[in-house]
Image: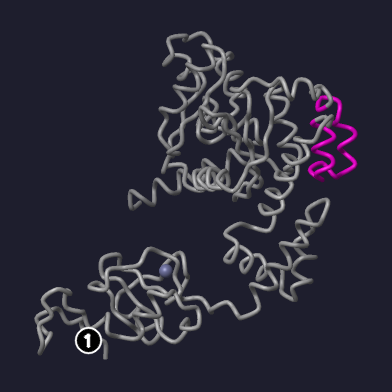
Amino acid sequence: MTRKATTHRGMNGVRTPRKPPQLSVERDPRWAAVVARDRKADGTFFYSVKTTGVYCRPSCPSRLANPRNVRFHGTAAAAESAGFRPCRRCRPNRPPLEQGHSALVAQSCRTIEAAGSAPRLATLAAQAGMSPSHFHRVFKTLTGVTPRAYAAAQRATRVRRELTKEGRTVTEAIYAAGFNSGGRFYESSDHLLGMTPTRYRAGGADQEIHFAVGDCSLGSVLVAASARGVCAILLGDDPNALARDLQDRFPHATLVGGDAAFEQTVARVVGLVERPDMGLDLPLDVRGTAFQQRVWQALRNIPAGQTTTYSEIAARIGAPTAARAVATACAANPIAVAIPCHRVVRRDGSVSGYRWGVERKRRLLDQEIGLRKLLRGQ
Ligand SMILES: [Zn+2]
């Protein structure tokens, strides 16, 4: 059924000297739907791209393929039996999102924006008339972020807006933005109160730190960056606790909630957490003592899927008797995963001591070691 796209040779009849000859794909009305990324055409056909080996829905937002490499298929199954993989952006092998989902998700976004604290997933899902897992998937497909990440970004935006108000302390601003809406805010407000509006306004140019919280397989991840690069990656269960930890680590900095562009930085860090072997293509702003810097640099030289010991690191940095100080420097590492302090284990190989929880360390290591075996075909 699916014929190969004819090339110019197949063109018959009139020569048009100025315009290049049209390919049969380009004359196919389905191509116009692809060019227009027509959602209404979704489900009526699929197209594959020879050069990428991938097939898509007509509305796929990826870069428009060269029509020379395009073929049409009646069903996803037909595209797969022709040897093409489903595109990871438009997910052509999944049922198309029903009409009305976007309106429901938009409504959920408004609910999140209006709420002082992040609404529960179950609440949002019930409001949209979907199961929590279905709602989570639909929300992420349409917005590109999870409901939780969306709520965190909203609160961060509100913090920033509140921070610019005259006479507000950072604590007041964070509270007003609903960032610390729990009762625990009052228990933990002491160190937040250490920052006055004066200090906020006097904050040096190099002390402005942008941050945002995202979700990853290990829980919440807070990513913070100065103008020089990523200065903190913190892992945990409670986004508010991560924000307080950031404040403690950079007590004189002006913390600014991440904007849309910063969400991409968060997405890249989440990608690093899921696939640490791929590395992070972002600059780091590593702040520490000279000794800590040497330790952290040595950590960055340990490949994913391998482990070492504190005394090995000590020997490597030319301080063979400083294993204990090495352990302390590992514990002080503010940039989880990108500075892989999780790859340091006890001499007997047992996993212990991780700033972000031993269970997370174990999962990171299991994942890396499993991946390494997989990539080696073991
Ligand atoms: Zn696609």
Q: Which residues are magenta?
A: 170-192
Residue 289 in the image: above or below residue 262: above
Report the image quarter containing ligand 1. Answer: bottom left
What residue is shown at x 50% (from left), y 83% (from top)?
40
Task: Tell me which corner region of the image, top left, top right, bottom left or bottom right, holds residue 222.
Answer: top right
Observer-nearest of 309 and 84? 84
Please report the residue visible at 82 percent of the width from the left and 29 percent of the height from the top: 169
Q: Nearer the viewer, residue 347 or 100?
A: 100
Query: Which residue is label 1 attached to?
Result: 3
Magenta region includes residue 158: no
Residue ID at (65%, 30%): 355
For disc 1, the neighbor class at 10 Å (few under 14, some 14 to 19, many from 20) is few
- Which residue is depicted at the point 52% across and 28% down? 344
Q: Position of residue 122 (x, y in %)?
A: 77, 65
Does 57 sit left or right of 160 as displayed? Answer: left
The N terminus appears in which quarter of the rendering? Answer: bottom left
Quarter of image, res 44: bottom left
Q: Is mark 1 within 8 Å of ligand 1?
A: no
Q: Position of residue 368 (x, y in %)?
A: 47, 44
The secondary structure making up most of the magenta span is helix
Q: Amino acid at mark 1?
A: Arg
Instruction: Relative to 225, say whether 253 is above or below.
Output: above
Counting from the top left corner in percent of width and height, residue 372 is at 40, 45
